[in-house]
Image: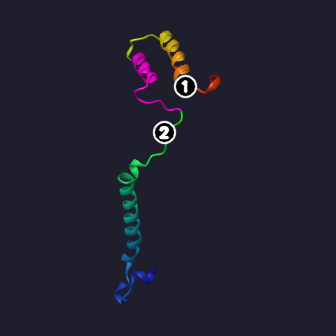
Amino acid sequence: METLAQFGDGGPGPWILLFPVIWALVIGGGITLLRRTVWRGRRGPARPGAVEADSPITVLGHRFASGEIDEDEYWRRLSVLDEQFGRTGKGGAA
């Protein structure tokens, strides 16, 4: 460390320690830029248990949340929709 501090003799001085920090910031900024732009659209496949936004199960959930139907009616209709649209696997296993 003493040789870095003796920049009057033609050595690089303490500023040489700043260059790795600059490179780390440049590389980190490049990765952040790529993640926010190019790699943003490359998401993996949808989750296997995910339900689409316009599916009947989602509409039923919204109706229950808004108070249009009560809990008993919600569960009754949900069991019918589960059989038709297959949110659960065969035999009722999730």
Residue 81 x %, y %: 51, 19
Vertically, is 90 above or below 70? below
Q: Element at badge 2? A: loop
- Mark drawn on residue 46: 2
Point 37% across, 81% down: residue: 13
As for residue 38 lying within the magenta part, the answer is no
Specify few, some or many for label 1: CA neighbours under 10 Å numbering under 14, 14-19, or 20 or more.
few
Residue 78 x %, y %: 51, 17
Q: Where does the magenta region start and end?
A: 49-65
* Amino acid type, mark 1: Gly
Q: Is residue 78 left or right of residue 41?
A: right
Q: CA distance from mark 2 to mark 1?
A: 16 Å
Specify few, some or many for label 2: CA neighbours under 10 Å numbering under 14, 14-19, or 20 or more.
few
* Residue 67, image quadrant: top left
Q: Which residue is mark 1?
A: 86
Please tell me which residue lies in front, 1 or 75: 75
- Mark drawn on residue 14: none
Q: Is residue 1 left or right of residue 36?
A: right
Point 43% across, 49% down: residue: 42
Look at discs 2 and 1 and give the one toward the viewer. 1
